[in-house]
Structure formats: structure tokens, C-alpha cells
Amino acid sequence: MSSQGVIFKRCGCTEAGTGRRLGEACPRSAVVGHGSWYFHVSVTNLMGRRERVRRGGYRTEAAARRARDDVLGRSREEQTSRSWTVARWLRYWLSTRVGIRPTTRASHTQYIERFLIPHLGSIRQGALTVRQLNGFFATVAKQTNRFGQPHTPTTLAHIRTTLRAALNSAIREGLIQDNPARRVELPFRRRPHAPVWTPGRIADWQATGVRPTVAVWTAAQLATFLDSVTEDRLYALWWLVGLRGLRRGEVAGLRWADLDLDHRQLAIVRARTTAGYQVYEGPAQVGRQQPHRRPRSAHRRGATGAPPPATPGVRRRCRQMAGHRVRVHQSPRRTAAPRVPHPPHRGPYRRRRAAPGAAT
């Protein structure tokens, strides 16, 4: 095929008996107005690779030639924008991201494969509009998750975040001029408030089974919990988490070298988390400051403030845990928090919104 491509005519006439298309053998191909004109050319995409572009449905040969010339006159970026679909760009964008955490990659993959590609994947990237995105989010909002509940505004916001990041990358590459995801209006996300488990709330939860999305223990409830697990092998761990509110990944990433009981120093230098069925370990994350959110302290990546004074019982349990770490590591049995008759709670929110005196 030449650099100018090929222009040809096709019709829908078929051979009697077999049903095969006649193509160029159609006896009426020379008749004006019979069939349509097509072209295909080879162009270079954004990655420097040659790919074929085929278009058709033109009434005259001159119209097909003008369309071919328009394709050949486009830049690589413009050609990629008009030929690549949203699905192709999303997968390419995700495959080229090297500076993101495994958990971030896993969440992007989920939103792309489960929501974005099934609904928007066939649309040409340069033809994506705000109206199409509004219809897409309205459709997703009516669907249900694996628990049979409608998708929350938080889920919709995370999907938009993934799409907006991918389209922002397309803008930086010169493929599109504007990001339609930036102008999509979504339902308001109300950040859950963490109430304290008062006796009235506990009674209502026990009677109805309905509980707040996020709730925290009082100082007395935390003390009762610690008293109930004094004989547990991981008592020192519950004591530390209860009084300092470490995040789950930070707790899982602790090593004995990070703890100095004599000088009351605890270094939060790493975190362990999961993405799918894989466990990843990396540096402890320092949160970005946002207007609606209290930022995480930058000193968390290093020596933190002193933990509460370690009682002799806590020191003894630490030595016991250190002595059993090899056996526990080799055992396939998983260790979970002891079951005690207390209302449910969320650890990270206890650190941010616990009642006064809960960490003393």
C-alpha cells in the first residue's frame, strides 16, 4: 500500500445462491450512486507505530479523497485522539504509570475494567463529551454493588478521579484540549461524622442492629476492652493501638527495631498493605493537606511522640511476643482481635475524634 493509501468502492450486492458479497465483481459498480466509497491509509500513532485507518460510507470518490487527505494531514497527537478509543487510552495510560502504589494501581484497574470501559470504552477519545459522562454516572448510580446497595457518592467520585487523571495525562500529551470529567457534577459526598458510643446508642444498636457508619469508643470502653484482653498474646499490640491509634498498615509494618521502650520512642517508617491477594511493604505515607481534612503529621515518617509509659505487664508481654515471633511466623493460623462484647468501632477515627481522655 502506498503512502497515499487506497480508495475503492464497495456495495452490498451478494451472489445468488451463496450469499457472498460481489465486491469489485458487481456488474453495477460503474453506475453512479451505486455503493459507497472507502479508503484506508497507514499512519503513525503516538508511540511511533504504524497502524491502518479505514473509513467509508462516502457517496463520491472525491469525498473519500478529501477525507483521506484530512487524515494524512493530521499530527500524531490529533490522529491518536481521533482513532484511539477511551478503552485503549485508559489501558495505555495505566500501563505507563510507574510512580503509583500497588493499591492505587489496583483501584484504578478496578474502576477502569468494571465501570469505565464497559460504558465508555467504545467512544473515540477526542469525541468524549460532558453529556456522555453525565449519562454514564447517572447509569452507574442506579446500579448496585456486591452487597445489593446502590453505589455511593464516594464510589462515583473515585471513578471520576481515575477518569480525570487519565484525561489530564492525555492533555499533557497534546491529544485533547479539554478534560470533560472536570465539569461533571456528582452527588454531594457527606463525610461521615464519628459519634461516640453513648449508652443510648449502644442500646439502640443492640435492639435494631443499625449502627453509625463510623463510631468510636469512650475512654471507659477502651479501658474495658484492654482489661478484657490482658491475657491475650497480643495484649501489648492492642495497648499500643488503643492508646496511640496507629493505622492498620502501620501496625502491620512495625518491627522490633522500631520500638524503644526505655526511651519511649516508636518509629513509624513503613506500612504493609494488600492489593488483591499480594502483600506490599513501603514507606509510611504522609497525607496531603486538604481543606476539609486534618493532615497527617509529617513526623509520622520517623520517630514519633512518646508512647504512654509502658507498665511492667506491657513490657513482659512485649518480651513474650518477641519470643514467639518465630513460631507465629511459621504457623499458618491467623491471629485476629479477641471477641469482646463491645460495640464496633473504627481505629483510625478513634485517633482523630475520640472523646477527651481516650488517649491518656
Image (cartoon, helix red, strand yellow):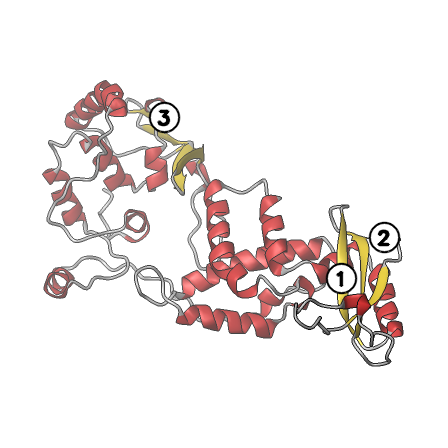
Secondary structure at numbered mark 3: helix
- In percent of width and height, residue 49 lies at 76, 46
Count of labels in the image: 3
Q: Are marks 3 and 1 in contact (CB under 8 Å)?
A: no
Say above or below: 149 vs 236.
below
Query: What is the CA distance from the residue labelled 3 to the residue labelled 2?
Result: 67 Å
Q: Which residue in the protein does label 2 denote?
A: 1
Is 176 or 261 nearer to us in this picture? Answer: 176
Secondary structure at numbered mark 2: loop
Query: What is the CA distance from the residue labelled 3 to the residue labelled 1?
Result: 62 Å
Q: Which residue in the protein does label 3 denote?
A: 258
Question: Which of the numbered marks, if any, corresponds to residue 12?
Answer: none
Say which amino acid is labelled 3.
Answer: Asp
- In percent of width and height, residue 85 lies at 64, 60
Residue at position x 50%, y 41% from top?
101
Q: Which residue in the protein does label 1 denote?
A: 54
Eye-nearest disc, 2 or 1: 2
Eye-nearest disc, 3 or 1: 1
Q: Are marks 2 and 1 in contact (CB under 8 Å)?
A: no
Residue at position x 48%, y 61% from top?
115
Upstream in the sequence, badge 3 or badge 2?
A: 2
Upstream in the sequence, badge 3 or badge 1?
A: 1
Say which amino acid is labelled 2.
Answer: Met
Looking at the image, residue 30 sits to the left or right of residue 135; the answer is right
Determine the residue located farthest toward the front in the rendered image. 17
Residue 338: name its quadrant.
Answer: top left
